[in-house]
Image: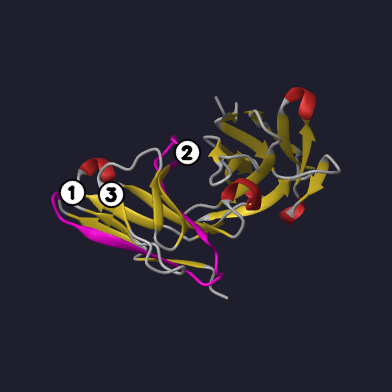
């Protein structure tokens, strides 16, 4: 049972480039989340999804896009990368909704924009 | 507004000493409370959670936490710290209410362990 898998683990982007961070879970969880983590700033919610075809913005959605075509996959798209998007990105999933069931996290993607 | 406060940004303890990490929350509904641990370069792992019942909950790695409703606190404790406990610890709160889709997170407490 792989849980939540994120790829790639590391990436360096140039300003203005685009990329997709992949997230896949094999637990049949309906709820999925994307967070970014910056030193001393805790976790900031970017986008989340409560099921296939349904997504919603979190606290810091600007500069990002998501889609949820299947239960398993929740990719995060960065268009026109900026230095401010240098961060560690975590994907998480939950069976009952994070408020009661807690999350299962992936191991993260460390992104540097230069 | 709903919030979670971890008053201690950084704590250093000696190996073998006891540990208490503080967490205070402000939440209108009945809270579901969580502690997560993040080892360097890793994702977050659930240590323990409280939903109802006994206010002292046991978790993995020898950790426990006590829910005190009167103090709006959910402090994490360990009787004897090991060097491998050095990590970032996050407290989070959720509920069954209308906003049950996501957790509210504290900013974390960084734990260093001296040999």
In the image shown, does B76 or A62 lie closer to the viewer?
Answer: A62
Depth check, mark 2 against mark 1: the one in front is 2
What range of the chain is rendered magenta? Answer: A15-44
| Disc 3 from disc 2: Cα separation | 19 Å
Looking at the image, residue A21 lies above or below residue B81: below
Q: From the viewer's perspective, tell me whether residue B97 is left or right of residue B73.
A: left
Judging by the rendered image, the residue that carries numbered circle 3 is: A64
Depth check, mark 3 against mark 2: the one in front is 3
Q: Earlier in the sequence, mark 2 or mark 1?
A: 2
Quarter of the image for residue A103 reads: bottom right
**Location of residue A87 in the rendering, given as x and y in whole percent from the top left corner:** 34, 47
Residue A42, disc: 2
| Disc 2 from disc 1: Cα separation | 23 Å
Residue at x 60% of width, y 49% of height: B37
Judging by the rendered image, the residue that carries numbered circle 1 is: A114
Q: Residue furthest right?
A: B54
Marks 1 and 3 on same chain: yes
């Amino acid at each position: 049972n792989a849980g939540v898998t994120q790829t790639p683990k590391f990436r360096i982007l140039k300003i203005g480039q685009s990329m997709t961070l992949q997230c896949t879970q094999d637990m049949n969880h309906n709820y999925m989340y994307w967070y970014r983590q910056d030193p001393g700033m805790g976790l900031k919610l970017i986008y989340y999804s409560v099921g296939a075809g349904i997504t919603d913005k979190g606290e810091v959605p600007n500069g990002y896009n998501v889609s949820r075509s299947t239960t398993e996959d929740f990719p995060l798209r960065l268009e026109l990368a900026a230095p401010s998007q240098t961060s560690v990105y975590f994907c998480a999933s939950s069976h009952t909704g994070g408020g009661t069931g807690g999350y299962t996290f992936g191991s993260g993607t460390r992104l540097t924009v230069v | 507004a709903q919030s979670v406060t971890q008053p201690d940004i950084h704590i250093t303890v000696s190996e073998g000493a006891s540990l208490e990490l503080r967490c205070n929350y402000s939440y209108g509904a009945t809270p579901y409370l969580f502690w997560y641990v993040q080892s360097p370069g890793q994702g977050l792992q659930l240590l323990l959670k409280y939903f109802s019942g006994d206010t002292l909950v046991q978790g993995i790695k020898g950790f426990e936490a006590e829910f005190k409703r009167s103090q709006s606190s959910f402090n994490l404790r360990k009787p004897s710290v090991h060097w491998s406990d050095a990590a970032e610890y996050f407290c989070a709160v959720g509920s069954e209410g209308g906003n049950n889709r996501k957790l509210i997170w504290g900013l974390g407490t960084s734990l260093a362990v001296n040999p």
